[in-house]
Image (cartoon, rainbow, N blue to C red):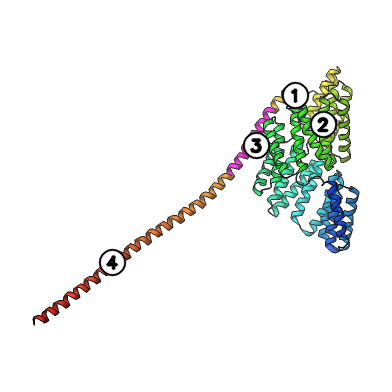
Amino acid sequence: MRTERSVIFIVILFVFLGFPTIKADELERIDSINQILLKQKGSDRVKTLIALSEAYRIISFDKSIKTGLDAVDYASANNFDALKAEVFKSLGTSAMESGDYLLALDYYAKSLEAFEKSGNFKEMALLNTSIGHQYFLLSDYDNAISHLENALNLGEKINSDSIAMIVSHAAGNILYETGAYNKALDAYYKTKILATELKEEVVYAKVIMNIGLIFWQWDENDKALGELKSAIEVFEKLDMKEMLSQALNNVGLIYLYDKDELETASMYFRKSLEIREKYGSPVPIANVLINMALVYARQDSIIKADQYFQRSLQIYENSGVVQGILRVYYHLGETHHRLENYQLSNTYLEKCMTKASEHKIDQYNTIVSDLFMKNYEALSDFQSFLKYYRVFKVNHDTLVNQFNLAQVRESQIKYRNIELFQQVEQLSAQNTAQQKKLNLYHYLFIALIGLIFTAVIIYYVMRQIKHLSMKAVQSNSELLLSHENSGNNK
């Protein structure tokens, strides 16, 4: 099942991506904000317009953008440059949540430019991370990595572990999507350590979910389910609906591909889809729709499967999510191969291969070639079959699985070594503190012995003095008596 698994587009979004809040709550909030806005001027008015723009996100994207641009105009007219940077950042998030990643890039770039003028390194680092994330969603990995490196350098300037944590997590996501699972695992372990040190429970839960996905890619399914279910517990406790939906979706994938328990998989997907449709973000909805399509395809409900495939493809195309488009093309090719529609299968596989080559996404080469060979074999077109034949295919699966198992063990040992090193440092610090206490007790004990010895000497001396004094008195008394007696004798 590993070849199927390797094409799954699982959005492992980090701290900046979330779902909008529930519509009823937002309507009430909008009414309240509008009442406040009637009485406001100055910088407070800009802040309230930002809040209103964000409240409109789930109600109307157009109103959200228009209100944000009103805030930009007011901030510009009153020379509130720092607030204008905040408005652009908010507009970028609104565009991202609507699935318009190119527009989000434009607004984030304007916000970054404004923060650069004020020299706000923290905001510059966070915006570089957000921009990197948009490029990641657009499968432009070179630009994504470039901006993440900028963010990391800025974080180092202000000595920020929180920035390092965010960037490490984002880098792990990119490495995962490009198939560099071992490097992704290293990045996630680093994130896990930083999240533990910073007591960032949310980031910790997100990263253990991501680690679980890598274990799944390497057929470590029990470990994968363990990590994912641990993440689900945290997301439920913190009432993080969007992340809970992601984790449920990912558990469903394991039951679909490795357990072959279609009803269980469908149950997890439906729970995930219920949350996502309630909160309305299009791309996360598409990620679950395609998984539902795969369940229907395996149950031979082809009409339903095709409806879900086409709906998810439309969302991916509208949002420009390349990985999603590739996944739909591949699975349509796979489904029609199973239905013996070999020519139609090849049509979708050609689309998949072409788009993957355009975006330098290599992990499709082997699996698409494999399906091409099966199709051409069935069509008795051996010349085309040879075109896609790969010498390494004979031992490919065995060698890759052995290599990946070795890689995961190496990463686990590396992480364990890091943990042990931290424990050694902690124990060393504790030993130093204990040694200081022991030294203090030792000195106090010596001082106490000294005091006791001194007291004994003083006591002894005082007794001697007292004894000598009494002897002197006694001698004087005896002498006096002797004088008295001699006087009487006279």
Residue type highlighted by circle 2: Met
First along the sequence among labels 4 and 3: 3
First along the sequence among labels 3 and 1: 1
Answer with left or right where residue 479 lies relative to residue 463. left
Which residue is disc 2 drawn over? 292
Q: Nearer the viewer, residue 212 or 172?
A: 212
Give coordinates of residue 356: x percent, y percent: 83, 33
Which residue is disc 1 drawn over? 393
- Asked if 260 appears above or below 464 in the picture, the reply is above
Q: Nearer the viewer, residue 409 or 216?
A: 216
Q: CA distance from mark 1 to mark 4?
A: 102 Å
Within-10-Å neighbours for mark 1: few <14, some 14–19, many 20+: few
Which residue is disc 3 drawn over? 411
Q: CA distance from mark 4 to mark 3?
A: 76 Å
Which label lies toward us, 2 or 1? 2
Which residue is disc 4 drawn over? 463
**Which quadrant of the rendered structure holds the C terminus?**
bottom left
Which label lies toward us, 4 or 3? 4
The local secondary structure at tag 1 comes to helix
Q: Is residue 272 magenta?
A: no
Judged from this view, the residue extending furthest toward the left is: 490
First along the sequence among labels 2 and 4: 2
Give coordinates of residue 411: x percent, y percent: 65, 37
First along the sequence among labels 2 and 3: 2
- Asked if 378 appears above or below 295 in the picture, the reply is above
